[in-house]
Every structure is written in structure tokens, then in C-alpha cells.
Amino acid sequence: MNALVEAHCVTRHYPIGKRWPWRSPQILRAVDGVSIEIRRSETLGIVGESGSGKSTLAQIVLGLAPPTSGQVLFEGRPVSGVDTRTWRALRREMQLVFQDPLGALNPRRTVGRQIEEPLVIHGVGNPQERSAIVQRILDAVHLKKSLAGRYPHELSGGQRQRVVLARALILEPKLIVCDEPVSALDVSVQAQIVNLLADLKTRLGLTMLFISHDLRIVRYVSDRIAVMYLGRIVETGDRRSIFSSPQHPYSQALISAVPELRTSAGPRPRIRLQGEPPSPIFLPAGCRFRSRCGRATSICAEVEPELAPAGPTMVACHHPGPAIGAAA
Amino acid sequence: MEPILRIANLAVGFGSPVAPLWAVRGIDLEVCKGEILGLVGESGSGKSVTFLAALGLLGGRASRKGSVRFEGLDLLELGDRELTALRGRRIAMIFQDPMSSLNPVQTVGKQLVEAITLHRGLAGQAARGEARRLLERVGLSDPDERMRNYPHQLSGGMNQRVMIAMAIAGKPDLIIADEPTTALDVTIQAQILDLLVELVREEGASMVLITHDLGVVAETCDRVAVMYAGRVVEVGPVERIFARAEHPYTRGLLHCIPTLESDVPLRPIEGSVPDAAEIGGGCAFATRCDMVHDHCRSTSPSFLEIGAGHGAACFRVSA
């Protein structure tokens, strides 16, 4: 089987504002009917703006937030609702890399101990063997071995993110989920970490779920990309098609909004979305994007579009097609 | 072009007044009338501190040297009262996080009217009418309703529009926008940047856009100044800098950013920005530079004009 992870129509709803017992709570639909598969050794990138549900989707994939409905399979076996032993075994297979390395590290422990901790928890090796593994992993993420005795505050932002990465990789997981792994870093350091991730992925044959709001970085690291809007995937396809010929009007606007360094290719089409996304609590009927969409017609207000092939990508839109005014 | 603001040999230090740590280590920078100047640099490069110091917003914590001339006045010499008269009215600032710049317990209308009264001397109906006009001008629909809203009832993008309305309330000659879109989503960022550029052009004002995103600079600015470790290392017209940057740091930065069109591998700048305390007499970039000479480690390069408004502080550059 080719897929390492399969999510079948997962949703995650949060009841909010249940102030009065006789009132039914409002429902925030953070993720609302998403099916994805992550193939072995590929990087699936997820892009979307804040509130699109990309981090919630990551939590569902990892089993950290059980889906309200739907199911996630890891190597064909369900991820949530399993017994403790299976759960622990699964933890070794999948790891999460957080956005804010300072928040993800314990300020009162040396980084060496924190990198070693997963080995201790899972009972791997004796102290000498563990120390040797820590040394090797430090080397793999290009950190000096002498840093193992330091505390997180003594390191720079880039070094801390390398520590977080080392800790995620030390159990040799099959899947790593990176949730905005470089957003807190400066541009020059961002590039170091992005290159390191790409290098480790190839060397270790990792499968990666890469979440970011930065389209330039997602395009750079991913093999396939899914674009999310208000809890749904609106378009998915391989990285080239998504960026060269997006078919969904939201993907087109999102890509066109990225400020680009000037290139010889001439001006890009400027598509500007009007207004802001509606609240994920009071979603409009039909297509969620229609309130900001220039192509919306009456069918968009009635029927929620499902993902279907359109041109080179899969699109959830009643009127897919190349951007209006875009160069062919 | 005639400069509206001229920063000369400005240094800003923190800590002990006797031996401060210099966050800004002597910069010269001009903002011309009607231009949008981009100021880029990584965190700690001194880009925000430069303008906070220039406007006297660092309080007594900072030591300042040099001069900042605005229309014949040296801002560093002015007293609190004179600066207050200037700030907001002639020189306006827009900050990164609108939520923490706006007062959470006052309505948007009240805060905007206060700014209008303060800077324009309007009161009552006239001030409220002007507030509604400004809200409409920055693209907020239903200004009457917005006037009654509190900041938490608006989204980040809408709050930033309110901040922009407050900034242009005094019809300023110079707007300092410090990472105005960093906290916003890309589609909202694009809207806000379009709005800022349009307003600046329409009012004939000048703007300094402080950002870490070279893409934002490429799409909005006329000229760009690149800062590294408290110095301006390169200045020039945007097209020229993006086509042929001279300073190894600027070139390095450009190689760190993936584009949407090509698959050129990223070439990161190795290492990290030095601490203010670690910078010795040499070039601050010497520790990370791939073209470094022995000379660079002992002597700091001075700024050299290359031509066409383009200049860089590097020994490798020749006029």
C-alpha cells in the first residue's frame, strides 16, 4: 500500500458558548469533511490562512484531537480510539515539530537531556547507547556536540529549532508533522532549517506533513499541496500545478497575494479578494467561499462543492478554471 | 529629490549610560519627499529602534548620538512638548499589532475622534463627520457601525485599517509603518499594502516601511535600505537592488527566499546574527561572509556610493 496516512472525511467540531443549559451550543467547524492521503516518502504541504483548520487537521492526523466524525488510518490501522499499548507504539512512528521552539523546550533542562528523553520514555538502550544516539542526531541536525550541555535560553532561535527537530527524529519516526516550523525564525535562518528538513527527508526517507501560511516555503519543500479554506480542502494537486495553473478562485487569489521578489517574468496577475472570511461558526450555506468569490452564482449558494478533477488539480468549485486575466 | 528626513550618524545604545551596548551603530539615511522607503533587516538589526529613537519613543532608557533632521529641526534636540506636537500630526506611526496599539475599552469612534481633535482641532459633529469619512477612506464599510465597535469586535485587518485612519487623521508628511502587515494573513496583507501605497501617493506623503519581508519591499517601495547589526549595509532603488545587489549580506538574503516561479535551491547564510556585545572593530558581517578578507575582521568598511543612488558598505565594492 502506498499511503502511509489516510484521513477519511474527518471533521472536528468544537462546541462553544454553551452558557445556558437549555440553549444548544454553537458549533465551530474547525475541520469539516477533509479527506487526504499522505504517501510514503512524500511531503504533503498544507496552506491556508489563520482559521482555515490546518493545525487542527495536523492534530487529527496525529491522533491528538480525535475527529468528531471520520477516521484516520496510519499504515491501515486507526489512530484514535486505540488501547494504551497501541497508542504508545504509534507515538514512536509519528512526531510533531512545533512552531515556537522556545515554547516547545523545557527551560530548566539541558538540551541534551531533552533530546534523549524520548529514548528514555520508550526504553531504548542503556545510558551509554543513548548518549551515542544523541551525539549522532546532533550531528545530523548540524549542531555542535558541546551544545548538549546547554540550556535552551543559551541557544539562538535556529539552534533551538534544530534541537526540536533532533528530538522529533531521535525515535526514527515514519511521519513527522511540521506545524509552521520556520515561521518564528529570521529569513537567513529559515533557509538553513528548510534546507536541513529537505536534506533529512531525502536521507531518512521521511514522510512529512508540512503546514505553513508561507506559500513560498510550502512550494519549496512539498511534493503535493492542499489548499484549505474554512475547514475544507478547496484544491489539491502536485506543487507545480497548484502554483502554475490553480483552478480554484481562492487558490488563485492566495497565490497572487504573495508578495514576490521581482523577476524577469513580468507582472503577475493581481487578484484582490474583497472582505474577510466569514466566521467558522456561522458558515454560509453552499460554498464557503462564495461571499468573496467573483464567480459565485445561484448554485454556489445551494450546493457545497466536492473535490473533483478539473484540469491538472482536484478542485472543490462549481466554476473551476484558470484565473481571469491571467497569462496563459 | 529633497529629503524630508535626514538621519546622520545616528547611534542608539541601551544599558549603562557610561558604556552602553550599541543597537544602532552610526547610520546615515535619508527619506525623500513623496517616496516609500523600505527598511529591511532581521530581528535585532536595529530597524525599529532607529525610528523609535528618532521620534523619542524610547524614553530615558536609551543613549542617542548623531542627528535626525526633519524640516530644519533636530528631533534629538527637541523637548517632550515639541515632539508631542510633531508626533501623530506631522510624523505618524503605524505599528505591527493593531490590537495592542488600540485601547481595548474605548470604541473605535472615540479613539479616532480623539486623534482628530488633537491633531486637527475639530470637535463635536465636525470631528465625528471627519472620523466617518476617514473610516470610509480606509475601506471600512458601514462607518457608523464601526464607530460604535470596540477593537475586539473587529478582525486584525479591520483594526489595522482603523490604525491607518488614525495615522492619516493629522494629514502627516511622513508615515513610519513598522511591520504593519506582519500579523495579518496574506490576502489581508495585500489589501492593507495596496491601501497604504494608495493613501501615501494620494496625499503626497512619504513613508518608511519597516519589514523583514523582501517581497513586500519589492512590491511597494521605491528605495530600500538593508540593515545588519546596527548599520545600513546597502541602499538603492528597489529594481537595482533586486537586480544587482552589491553587499554579500543583501545577496545572501535574496538567496534565502524561495520564489513561486523557480526551483533554484536556497543558499542560506550560515551562522547567526552576532550579539551587540560581540561586534568588534571589523565588519559585523565578517563572521558569516563567504567573501571575507583578513582586512574585514579588523576594519569596518565605510559606506561607498556606487552610482544611481546605490551604495554599500563593503570592501569588495568599488565605485
Image (cartoon, coloured by chain):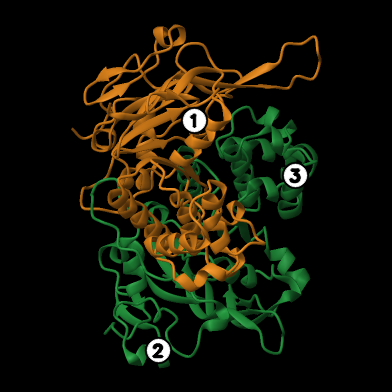
- Secondary structure under the numbered disc 3 in the rendered image: helix
Residue type, label 1 = Leu
Residue B111 marker: 3
Q: Position of residue A201 (x, y in %)?
A: 32, 48
Disc 1 versus disc 2: distance between alpha carbons? 49 Å
Q: Which chain is orange?
A: A
Q: Residue furthest left?
A: A328
The chain under label 1 reads A
Residue at screen point 71% across, 34% down: B147
- In the rendered image, the vertical position of residue A68 relative to residue A326, given as above or below: above
Residue type, label 2 = Arg
| Callout 1 and callout 2 share a chain | no
Question: Which is nearer the eye, A80 or A197?
Answer: A80
Q: Residue furthest front?
A: A126
Q: Position of residue A155 (x, y in %)?
A: 55, 67
Residue position marked by numbered label 2 in the rendering? B297
Residue type, label 3 = Gln
Q: Colour of chain B?
A: green
The chain under label 2 reads B
Question: Which is nearer the eye, B213 or B292?
Answer: B292
Q: Quadrant of residue A214?
A: top left
Residue position marked by numbered label 1 in the rendering? A57
